[in-house]
Amino acid sequence: MVDDLAVLLYPFRSMPLPGVRIRRGENGGPGGTAYLIVEHGDGVDHIVISDGTDRTFGASGLATDAICAVVRTDSDGAYVSHAAVSGTRLVFGDRNLDMSTR
């Protein structure tokens, strides 16, 4: 099951290894759903792997009906970028993020 073990592959280009910390976010959802927070040198990635049910994850106000969504913030928590698959809604804090196909 997705929620039994959080595993992350984090690519890097050169030594030394980047400092990366992964933890489970609050309001992780039901079994088979994961909300992971990945802290790294460039900021923080909020990653949701879900069943596509519209719900809110964590104190950041990440809300989506996507099966997979990633929102990147800088080290101060300001929005940088996002990506999502198979959803119609992605909100982060007070931002309604574009889910249209590019």
Image: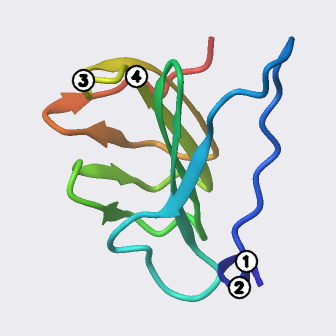
User: Which amino acid, by three-letter code, is at mark 1?
Assistant: Leu
Query: Whole-Å distance between the Cαs marked 3 and 4?
Result: 22 Å
Query: Whole-Å distance between the Cαs marked 3 and 1?
Result: 28 Å
Asked whether the residues under the numbered discs 1 and 2 touch, taking CB atoms below 8 Å apart as contact, a structural biologist would say yes
Given residues 94 and 20, the one toward you in this image is 20
Asked if 17 appears above or below 60 in the picture, the reply is above
User: Which amino acid, by three-letter code, is at mark 3?
Assistant: Asp
Instruction: Work out which quarter of the rendered image holds the C terminus and state it.
Output: top right
Residue that label 3 marks: 76
Packing grade of label 1 (10 A; few <14, some 14-19, many >=20) is few
Residue 73 in picture, x, y percent from top left: 38, 25
Packing grade of label 4 (10 A; few <14, some 14-19, many >=20) is some
User: Which amino acid, by three-letter code, is at mark 4?
Assistant: Asp
Query: Whole-Å distance between the Cαs marked 3 and 2?
Result: 30 Å
Residue 67 in picture, x, y percent from top left: 62, 56
Packing grade of label 2 (10 A; few <14, some 14-19, many >=20) is few
The image's colouring method is rainbow
Residue that label 4 marks: 98
Residue that label 2 marks: 4
First in sequence: mark 3 or mark 1? 1
Identify the residue at horizontal 41%, vertical 64% (top origin).
Answer: 25
